[in-house]
């Protein structure tokens, strides 16, 4: 079994501590690309070693292959509950990539698709899982999921999700009718970027000429995708999108996230008409074609893959550099899943490029915005206490189209924004802007500064930091102060100023010397 990263180990430890203390349902949040599946498969491996059954549930047949492959790579034997055709494809893939298959009809680890298992519930007497793992757990509150989960009411439940939020604001908490008792959060995206586990990124919001007169209706809490499709369906828009792709990301492997299958096909056609190699993929695409297309995208034989955001979960293409955001969505999950596709690090990629044509950055903020997750299912961002603005504050430079934190001067090109425009610059008029690393660093610095000035848990909470996190921060500070005292005793030669700048690890090292 391959080893885990330090933060993954910490998460596994936190999850098992909860189970040991009697908690039954744990929801584990960890960013797209942080290795959630691998972290959880480590837990699965432990069960398998002690001969207890684990049931791993995915919500779509296409995701089975990915889960099964993760187990195979860890050398974990697993049994499948799915359509025969899927089982054959999974075995074939393991033979192809690993020279053998880990699919085994007597294995303790069971991988199942929710659609198949719900139909067979009364025909699975051999299945008595001690632990159930629900992949994409933000969906696990749905009726089909509940029927399956309630079939084994005593099993421990671990939900996995990058974005435990729901547009319908249903709570994940058992106390409010949900399924989980506690939440374990992974590291913030900004940290994952700093550690090199995710790629750095630039955001541009290029202007496109939306078709006028299309009324955007609502459907299930989000925009009606048919209306979004209609708004994008004009030759001038295809031209806009391709033009900006050429200017800002020419030759870089790109994935376009479209509102509908039809629009994905139209954009692919438009790219082909402009001389690019492009293909549209959707849920009905033949698996071999899908696999070959993604390989071609990585090998530079294909420039653009267009897809529908709802179908992006199974796409694992670290070499994809550019995200063409063409689906406006109010769903933070969809947005983060889409940009997460290009945030995977890859040796040939210096930074990811996000071309936000539909203003999703101004709805949801930057991908590495500090977000606080909770079991209540609501979407929220961490805000400073003095921040009463209702929406995300980003500004698009009218000169270079970079999206940045509001500033009088564009950090990307140095363009001075005229004073009267500064407030309504949020790309309503369709300007394209990049948000630079410097600007983001400036925001982070300001957040850290504010946080540093707060004296108590209450003051941190007033800044919008969650109580649990605030307690951790204060606890860490107190611990550091104690360490500092110890160093002062042991090493009186270290000047106070230097002492104050030392990190806990350095302090510990100083005591050890
Ligand atoms: Zn600029």
Image (tube, helix red, strand yellow):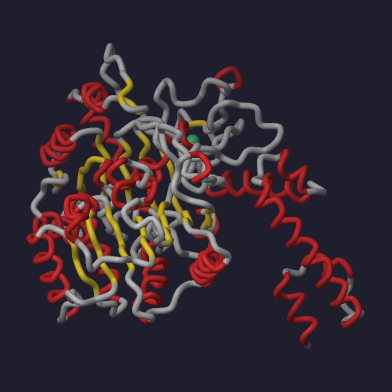
On the image, the x and y values in percent for residue 420 come to 59, 17
Q: Residue furthest top?
A: 213
- Residue 327 in the image: above or below residue 158: above
In this rendering, the answer to whether 16 lies above or below 267 is below
Q: Is residue 231 left or right of residue 31?
A: left
Q: Residue drawn at (36%, 61%), measured in percent from left and top?
A: 132
**Residue at (48%, 31%) from the top-left corner?**
397
Q: Would you say residue 97 is visible in this rendering? A: no
Q: Is residue 245 above or below residue 186?
A: above
Question: Which residue does the image show at 48% across and 72% down from the upper left?
Answer: 5
User: Where the N terminus falls, by quadrant?
Assistant: bottom left
Number of callouts in the render? 0
| Front residue of this view, candidates 53 and 310 | 53
Q: Position of residue 93 (x, y in %)?
A: 14, 69
Relative to 57, does residue 484 appear above or below in the rendering?
below
Figure quadrant of residue 338: top left
Instruction: Where is residue 450? Give x, y as percent.
Output: 74, 45
- Toward the viewer: 98 or 180? 180
User: Along the horizontal axis of the image, is 351 left or right of 23?
Assistant: left
At x 24% / y 69%, what residue is drawn? 69
- The C terminus, quarter of image: bottom right
Residue 445 visible here: yes
**Near-viewer residue (242 or 141):** 141
Quarter of image, res 293 = bottom left
Q: Nearer the viewer, residue 143 or 340?
A: 143
């Amino acid at each position: 079994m391959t080893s885990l990263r330090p933060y993954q180990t910490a998460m596994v430890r936190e999850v098992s501590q909860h189970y040991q203390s009697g908690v039954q349902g744990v929801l584990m949040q960890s960013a797209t690309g942080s290795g959630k599946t691998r972290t959880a498969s480590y837990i699965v491996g432990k069960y398998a070693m002690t001969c207890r059954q684990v049931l791993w549930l995915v919500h779509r047949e296409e995701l089975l292959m990915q889960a099964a492959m993760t187990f195979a790579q860890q050398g974990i034997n697993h049994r499948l509950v799915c359509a025969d055709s899927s089982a054959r494809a999974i075995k074939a893939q393991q033979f192809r990539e690993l020279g053998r298959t880990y699919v085994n009809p007597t294995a303790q680890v069971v991988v199942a698709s929710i659609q198949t298992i719900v139909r067979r519930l009364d025909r699975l007497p051999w299945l008595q899982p001690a632990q159930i793992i629900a992949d994409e757990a933000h969906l696990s509150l749905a009726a089909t999921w509940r029927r399956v989960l309630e079939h084994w009411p005593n099993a421990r439940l671990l939900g996995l999700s990058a974005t435990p939020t729901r547009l319908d604001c249903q709570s994940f908490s058992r106390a409010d009718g949900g399924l989980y008792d506690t939440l374990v959060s992974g590291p913030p995206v900004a940290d994952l970027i700093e550690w090199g586990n995710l790629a750095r990124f630039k955001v541009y919001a290029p202007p496109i000429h939306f078709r006028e007169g299309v009324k955007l209706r609502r459907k299930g809490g989000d925009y009606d995708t048919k209306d979004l499709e209609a708004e994008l369906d004009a030759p001038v828009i295809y031209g806009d999108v391709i033009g900006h792709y050429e200017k800002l990301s020419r030759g870089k492997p790109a994935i376009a996230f479209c509102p509908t299958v039809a629009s994905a096909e139209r954009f692919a056609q438009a790219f082909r008409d402009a001389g690019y190699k492009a293909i549209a993929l959707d849920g009905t695409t033949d698996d071999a074609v899908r696999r070959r297309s993604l390989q071609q995208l990585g090998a530079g034989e294909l420039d653009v893959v267009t897809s529908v955001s709802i179908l992006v979960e199974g796409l694992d293409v670290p070499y994809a550099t550019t995200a063409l955001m063409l689906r406006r969505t109010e769903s933070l999950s969809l947005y983060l899943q889409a940009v997460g596709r290009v945030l995977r690090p890859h040796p040939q990629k210096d930074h990811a490029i996000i071309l936000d044509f539909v203003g999703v950055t101004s709805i949801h903020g930057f991908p590495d915005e500090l977000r606080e997750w909770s079991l209540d299912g609501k979407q929220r961002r961490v805000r400073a206490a003095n921040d009463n603005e209702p929406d995300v504050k980003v500004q698009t430079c009218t000169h270079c189209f970079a999206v940045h934190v509001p500033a009088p001067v564009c950090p990307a090109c140095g363009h001075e924004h005229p004073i009267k425009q500064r407030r309504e610059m949020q790309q309503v008029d369709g300007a394209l802007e990049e948000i630079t690393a410097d600007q983001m660093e400036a925001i982070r610095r300001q957040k850290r500064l504010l946080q540093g000035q707060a004296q108590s848990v209450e003051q941190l909470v007033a800044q919008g930091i969650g109580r649990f996190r605030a307690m951790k921060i204060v606890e860490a500070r107190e611990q550091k102060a104690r360490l500092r005292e110890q160093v002062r005793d042991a090493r009186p030669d270290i000047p106070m100023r230097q002492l104050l700048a030392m990190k806990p690890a350095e302090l510990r090292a100083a005591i050890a010397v």
